[in-house]
Image: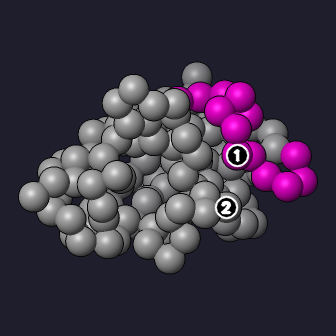
Amino acid sequence: QVQLVESGGGLVQPGGSLTLSCTASGRTFSNDYIGWFRQAPAKEREFVAAIQWTSGRILYADFVKGRFTISRDNAKNTVYLQMNSLKPVDTAVYYCAVALYCPQYGCYDLSDYNYWGQGTQVTVSS
C-alpha cells in the first residue's frame, strides 16, 4: 500500500516562498508520476505539477510556470514543490498523488492518479 505524507505548508505573506515535501512509502517507483494538486475552498481540485520518477520529466500547469519548481530526491523517496512569489490565489490545500501509469503526454487529470496524501494547508495572506 502506497502512503504519501505531505509537509511544509503554513501561512506566508504575498510574495513569499514555501517548500512542500511529499514523502512516499510502500512502493518502489519506476515510471510513476508523482504530482501535486491543490484545492481552494469551494473550488475543484486542480493540477499543479508532476514529475516522472525515473526520467525526471516535468509537467506544470500554466498558472505556476516560472513560480513553482517540482523536484525529487530518489534516495529519500521524496518529491518537493518549491513555491515562490506566492499570491493570495495560491491559498489552498495542496495534495501529492501517485499515478502508476500515464499516457505519453503525461498525467494531468485527477482520474490519472491512484494514491493520494492527506494534504497540507497553504495560506497566503498579509
Looking at the rendered structure, which numbered label has been put on residue 57?
A: none
Determine the main secondary structure of the stretch shown in magenta: loop
Residue at 16%, 54% in the rendered image: 125
Is residue 83 placed above or below 1 in the rendered structure? Answer: below
Q: Amino acid at mark 1?
A: Tyr
Residue 95 in view: yes
Location of residue 114 by image quarter: top right
Q: Position of residue 45 (x, y in %)?
A: 52, 34
Q: Is residue 75 magenta?
A: no
**Image coordinates for residue 56, horizontal then vertical, percent:** 68, 67
Q: Which residues are magenta?
A: 103-117
Q: Tags 1 and 2 in contact by the CB under 8 Å rule? A: yes
Comes first in the chain, label 1 or label 2: 2
The residue lying furthest to the left in this view is 126
Q: Secondary structure at mark 1?
A: loop
Of 21 and 25, the residue lying toward us: 21
| Residue 106 placement, left or right of 93 | right
Quarter of the image containing the N terminus? top right
Residue position marked by numbered label 1 in the rendering: 108
Q: Callout 2, which amino acid?
A: Leu
Q: Which mark is residue 59?
A: 2
* Secondary structure found at label 2: strand
Q: Splitting the image into 4 quarters, where does residue 83 fall? A: bottom left
Give the residue displayed 45% in from the left and 41% down from the top: 38
Which residue lies most toward the bottom here?
66
